[in-house]
Amino acid sequence: MIPLLVGLLLAQSAPGEPQVFLHQFDLEDRTGAAFDPANPKLRLTLELSGRDDVAFLSERLGKKPARPGTVVVDGLGYRGGSDPVDARYKAASFVLDFDEKPVAAVIAQVRKELGDKPSVEQLIHFVERYIEKKDLSRGYDVASVVATRKQGDCSEHAVLLAALLRAFGQPARVVHGLAIVPMFGKVQAFGHAWVEVHQGKQWQVADAALGTELPRAYLPMSALSNEGVGFGLSALSSANLLYVKKLVLELAP
């Protein structure tokens, strides 16, 4: 089922460009200005047909939908949520299996290169380098498989990064949503997977697939809630991204 999902969510990319996004959506850019994720006047309007997405976004935004099936996001600062850290966000799981030998070997490599207390930023750059082949050929691999194959798209980057963060004591979880990124001369919207890591009082973005240099905004729309053997059904929550019917980016009046 998961390989089929990847087949449904093929991203568009320029020849020779790494393929890390799950899917590309049409985005209508009405701003007429250079994209600045920090601009508080940016407004993103989403028309959705998936009830789960509407509920998840509404909870993160702290407000009800403007109208049925429509979510308005004023300002593209990250909505990471302030829910407390649960013990499961620190533990090894079937998906984030940092207690398995292949991941243990990667942990040893991290310690050798970065010491016993690598920062979040250091782990982001490590995973970005470690996954050598960036393409859509994998379905949704668990961390030990990613550690062995060194291959995959944003979901593989997220899974390995989350596993390493937990291994070094950082609470982490995998989320899915939209990445708004200026690419090839225009602002574009992509289905994407990344990590939320708990720092201070809030969950923050950690993304090894895009590194740290490219300007972008993130909109979380679901989380990998099941990390057990049956994680495939939870991973299919990324398919809810297919329920995005319309995206409009504009400047709020």
Image (cartoon, rainbow, N blue to C red):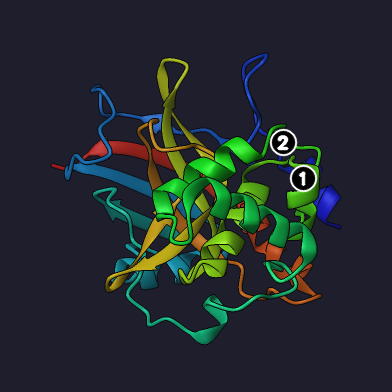
The quarter of the picture where the C terminus appears is: top left
Q: Nearer the viewer, residue 160 or 183?
A: 160
Which numbered marker is on residue 225? none
Residue that numbered label 2 is attached to: 10
In the picture, measured across the screen, residue 206 lies left or right of residue 79, that is: right
Observer able to see residue 161: yes
Q: Mark 1 near mark 2, Cβ–Cβ under 8 Å?
A: yes
Nearer to us in this view, 140 or 244: 140
Task: Kindly state the secondary structure of the residue where label 1 is placed.
Answer: helix
Residue at numbered disc 1: 6
Does residue 186 appear left or right of residue 156 in this picture?
Answer: left
Residue at 74% from the left image edge and 40% from the top image edge: 151
- Quarter of the image holding residue 92? bottom right
Examine the rendered structure and indicate whether residue 244 appears above or below residue 131: below
Image-based side of 181 in relation to 31, left or right: right
**Relative to residue 221, is residue 55 depicted above or below?**
below
Considering only vertical position in the picture, is 251 above or below 35? below
Observer-nearest residue: 64 or 11? 11
Residue in view at x 67 percent, y 55 percent: 239
Q: Position of residue 200 (x, y in %)?
A: 27, 70
Q: Looking at the rendering, in which quadrant would you find the N terminus? A: bottom right
Q: From the viewer's perspective, is 3 left or right of 50? A: right
| Residue at 57%, 68% in the rendered image | 167
Residue flagged by tag 2: what amino acid is it? Leu
Q: Type of residue at label 1?
A: Val
Q: Position of residue 140 (x, y in %)?
A: 75, 54
Q: Please name whichever residue, 184 or 228, is drawn nearer the observer in this view of the structure.
A: 228
C-alpha distance separating marks 1 and 2: 6 Å
Q: Is residue 234 above or below residue 43?
A: below
